Image (tube, rainbow, N blue to C red):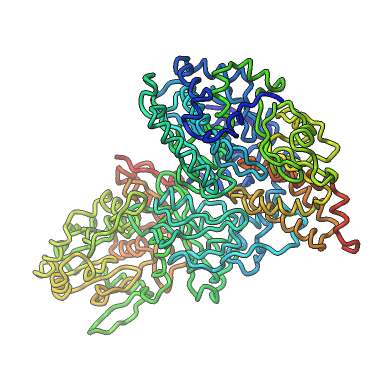
Amino acid sequence: MAEKIFTRNFDRPNSHTLGVYRETGGYTALPKALQMEPSAITEEVKKSNLRGLGGAAFPTGMKWSFIPKGGTAPKYLVINADEGEPGTFKDRYLLERDPHALIEGMIIAARAIDSHTGFVYIRGEYVEPWRVFSGAVKEAYDAALLGRNIQGSGFDFDIVVHRGAGAYICGEETGLLSSLEGKKGWPKIKPPFPAIKGAFGQPTIVNNVETIAAVPHIINRGAAWFAGLGSKTQGGTRLYSVSGHVVKPGVVEAPVSVTLRSLIYDHCGGIRDGRRLKAVVPGGSSAPILTADEIDVIMDADGLKAAGSMIGSAGVIVMDETVSIPEALMVVARFYAHESCGQCTPCRESTGWIYKMAHRIVDGKGRKEDLDTILDVAKRGAGTTICAFYDGAVGPYVSYIEKFRAEFEALIPRDA
Amino acid sequence: MPKLTIDGREVEVAPGTNLIEAARQVGVEVPHYCYHPGLSIAGQCRLCMVDIEKNPRPQIGCNTQAADGMVVHTQTERVLETRKSIMEFHLVNHPLDCPVCDQAGECWLQIYYMRHGLYDPRMVDEKVHKPKAVPLGPHVILDAERCILCSRCVRFCDEVTGTGELGIFNRGDQSEIGLFPGKTLENKYSGNVIDICPVGALTDREFRFQVRVWYLDTARSVCNGCARGCNIEVNHSRRRPHHNQGRRIARIKPRHNPDVNQWWICDEGRYGFHWIDDDTRLLAPARRTNGKDGQLGWDEAVADLAAALRRYRPEEIGILASPQMSNEDLFALQRIAGQLGIRAVDHRVPPRVPGDEDNLLIRADKNPNRRGAELIGLTQGETRAILDGTRQRRIKLLWIFQHDLLDSGLPAADVTAALAAAEMVVFQGPTANATSAGAHLLLPSAAYVEREGTFTNFQGRVQRFRMVVEPLGEAAADWDILGRLGRALGAPDPVLAATRAEQVFTGLAGHVPAFAGMTYRALGDAGLTVKA
């Protein structure tokens, strides 16, 4: 088995406490980072091939380098812990079982971008993760790991924990910032990008929980080590949230070069009850679906891109032969209709429309033109909106119908 | 200054200009809903997509600044297809109730559907239902089903008035415009949200269902409600007296002038036109003897006044001009007074209560032409001295323009005594009031919308207003009445021989240095500022 990084302490009692974290090498990267030049930290992260693990897989070091150097205005580090992508539940494990990895990673990242305030935006439903993480932040303050003059380094850093109120769109980078600012969680038009004008109008980096939790390990063990764990274009291991009809669902840590087949059959024990695999959504609900024949794919950003899907949040939803794909589309369409923020017209109007059509098809009241209408509407709306929400919805709309069209057609009455 | 190419036409624009405005400069319309030049960029409607060379897909024009060397195409096949798609999305849940919608005829959903939509409808499912006919405040009513959620109204209340009454509530296709709890849309500029609403979501509680907009004519004018002189359009129903309850003026809309009122007007100005068609108007010249009114023809009325002006010595005559009168009227009056050597002339009558004022448009001085009256010099006398002189019977003929002295900041007892002491009171103005009730000679003036002229606003900006409708009854423009009087007095003054307001203005430009060089043509639609 490959080396465990994120999950190394998951099964250890009280892994969320400062004491256990320290016993297992915690907070040893911090003093090193506090000695490093900020630009050297960014450089190390660049070389590690760490890519954003929240969904977009953007190279993390490069993102940090977009923050303007110097200046007296505050810069903010914001952690996206609004884990809302259906099929994704890895960040809650990190918050509950390894919160100090996130805190240590935040201090290091903050030093790299010259930020003295970090916000952790935790989704409203995550009560227990919020409780545990808040406790860890208090421990860190009590141990002088946060606050003024950390470890005598002269570096100040504060963490503000902020709870969301339960909207998927608040996991979108700029929707999150709007919400953090106390506004309705509407994504912001770009430009300006957050690195130039983000939270409260200041330069801001928004990173996923898991991404930042990887940072102490990179500093401790070096970029080459981390890069070597992964594929050519993406370093490290990552957490796959595997749900659905596998024998052993749960959070699986594996190198990003793992195949989907290996995840399902080696790590999760294969399909339950000896049934046949039908389809897999590999990267959270927004990722285009893969058929049972398409699972020999490398589970990194480029591998899934080449397969016409995306790694997204690495939420792997496994569907066996008992699943009705039209019903699955209806459910996912209802989700996007309910969660569209309503700001941009194409998304606001067509998510509801497509849900109505999908619902009608499942009800046996489909019309033969409905499938082409859904495909056409989805494709016309794609790429026309402020944020990536709608493109995320288009993933399932188009792939479910294109790959399982006969199943949809079978539900449409012949005389329709 | 970035130089770019739009649809093959080169244009140089100011730095920061977005692609919608840059395209406008070369005569290319980029359709849009949420963008408004007076508001922040929202980027929500997604209709203003244009193709920019070297960009993989169309970009919104509103949030893209013109850059040097940029090559923009607004008519590529994919731009046209995108517009069509966006139009379809805008109309998915729209009720399509145009026949009963007051916006029909000036609705940008209709206009853009015809220009850029024209697809076959594919929506067969039940549309989303939302609140209808919801009063938001005294002037504005909401139909949330027609709303396309462009957020212009929300941004107006946040950014222009700073009152923040409106928000968008709920998510997805359940989103709707509404009032924050405990709020009412009753700021002093609330009517502007009706103008900037591109669809039939926000309509005018007073105007709606009165006239179909295609029966309206329009004329450019200037608001007479305060010293700002907001540029307006006056919409009138001329050919259909059975509409709008017989009233000719149907509504007032703001007209863009970046130096005066931007895109806005206040509600006071917007809704302050009812006097024009109401029954307080003076319709014919009249002579009042022994408490009885006798109607006169204009020739007789003017002869009456001329005789009176000759009967008294100049120092026995007092004139109270009005800053409601146009520059032309005031200049003609100045010529008459000069001709006769009358020095007891003023235009200043204090208001009963001080007017309200704010930092946006509203001025405390509720008169449109105070500055004109000052520049033309109708200030040789002083109102209180004139009234004192009248009370003491030194002034025997009191000629009052428009003012209701009995509803002013002057002590009522002094006014009453003066009016009682005067041997002859002449009242000239468009509407009757308590002061006119005691006059011996009544001369009906045309309302500002019934004639041409100019006002000089508090900034010294001289602005033209056009004739919208014919004068009611026998009413005539003040400069015209004064011209007839001048001829009756035998005054050899070309200004008083004028047959058009423009000729009087030419005289003004020739005699009063502040107006030197100005002509109606040069004033144009935006006006010119007087010389300091």
Identify the residue at image location x=17%, y=65%.
B410
A328 relative position to B24: left or right = right
Q: Indicate the position of residue B465 as horizontal and vertical percent values.
A: 43, 55
For this orientation, the residue located farthest to the right is: A414
Number of residue marks:
0
- Which of the 4 image quarters holds residue B268? bottom left
Q: In the figure, B187 relative to A8: above or below?
A: below
For this orientation, the residue located farthest to the left is: B392
Q: Indicate the position of residue B412 as horizontal and vertical percent values.
A: 16, 71
The residue lying toward the viewer, choosing from A102 and B280, is: A102
Q: In the figure, A255 relative to B202: above or below?
A: above
Residue B389 visible to the viewer: yes
| Screen quadrant of the C terminus of chain B | top left
A192 relative position to B386: left or right = right
Q: Indicate the position of residue A364 as horizontal and vertical percent values.
A: 82, 62
Identify the residue at image location x=40%, y=53%.
B230
Q: Indicate the position of residue A265 as horizontal and vertical percent values.
A: 79, 35
Identify the residue at image location x=50%, y=42%.
A130
Residue A196 visible to the viewer: no
The residue lying toward the viewer, choosing from B477 and B412, is: B412
The residue lying toward the viewer, choosing from A258 and B478, is: A258
Q: In the figure, B29 relative to B304: above or below?
A: above
The residue lying toward the viewer, choosing from A331 and B435, is: A331
Q: In the figure, B476 relative to B507: above or below?
A: below
